[in-house]
Amino acid sequence: MTESTSPKVNKDQLAVTEKIDSMPEPYRSVARRLHEVILSAGPKLKPRLWYGMPGYATARSAPVLVFFRLDDDLMSVGITEKAYRAPGPDAPDTLMPCAWYLTELDDAGADRIAEVVRAAFAE
C-alpha cells in the first residue's frame, strides 16, 4: 500500500493510544474506558497529548477542555479553566468541582464523567 492510498493515521490519536497502552494495570484499563467515555460523551472532541497525558479539545489548535492523568499511583480526570463551569442547580455553595481521583471506573462513575464532559460544553 502506498502512502497516498494508506488510511490517514491521526498522529494525535495514536500518541494518546500509545500513552494509555504504556500505563501499568489497573490504570491502563481505567484509562481505556475513560478515553471511550470521554469520546462517546463528546463526539466532536479531538484527543491529543497535553502535558504528556491525554487531553481532549474541540480542535487541534483549541484549548483542552477535559483531561485525565496518572501521577504516581493516582489517576485523576478533570476539566480545565477553558471548560464551561457553573455550580450545579442544587449546589449548597458556589464551589465548582474541577477534578476527581479514581482507582476504578464503574458504570455510575462512567455516567458521571459523561455528564461532566457534556457540561464542559454547556453555556
Image (cartoon, helix red, strand yellow):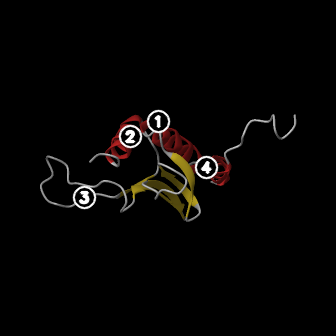
Q: Could you tell which of marks 4 and 3 lies nearer the N-terminus? A: 4
State if disc 1 and disc 2 touch (CB < 8 Å): yes
Q: Does residue 73 appear in the picture of this structure?
A: no
Is disc 4 placed on a helix, strand or loop? loop
Count residues near mark 1 (Cα–Cα under 10 Å), then give few for <14, some for 14-19, many for 20+.
Answer: some
Q: Which is nearer the eye, 88 or 109? A: 88
Q: Could you tell which of marks 3 and 2 lies nearer the N-terminus? A: 3
CA gap, disc 1 to disc 4? 23 Å
The amino acid type of the residue labelled 4 equals Glu
In the orientation shown, which residue stands out farthest toward the front? Answer: 4
The amino acid type of the residue labelled 3 equals Met
Residue 25 is situated, as x and y percent measured from the top left of the image, at 61, 49
Count residues near mark 2 (Cα–Cα under 10 Å), then give few for <14, some for 14-19, many for 20+.
Answer: many
Residue tagged by mark 3? 96
Is disc 1 placed on a helix, strand or loop? helix
Residue tagged by mark 4? 25
Q: Could you tell which of marks 2 and 4 lies nearer the N-terminus? A: 4
Give the numbered dot on residue 40.
Answer: 1
Give the numbered dot on residue 114.
Answer: 2
Mark 2 vs mark 4: give the one in front.
2
**Residue at figure coordinates x 87%, y 37% from the top left:** 2
Residue 114 is situated, as x and y percent measured from the top left of the image, at 38, 40
Mark 1 vs mark 4: give the one in front.
1
CA gap, disc 3 to disc 2? 17 Å
The amino acid type of the residue labelled 1 equals Ser
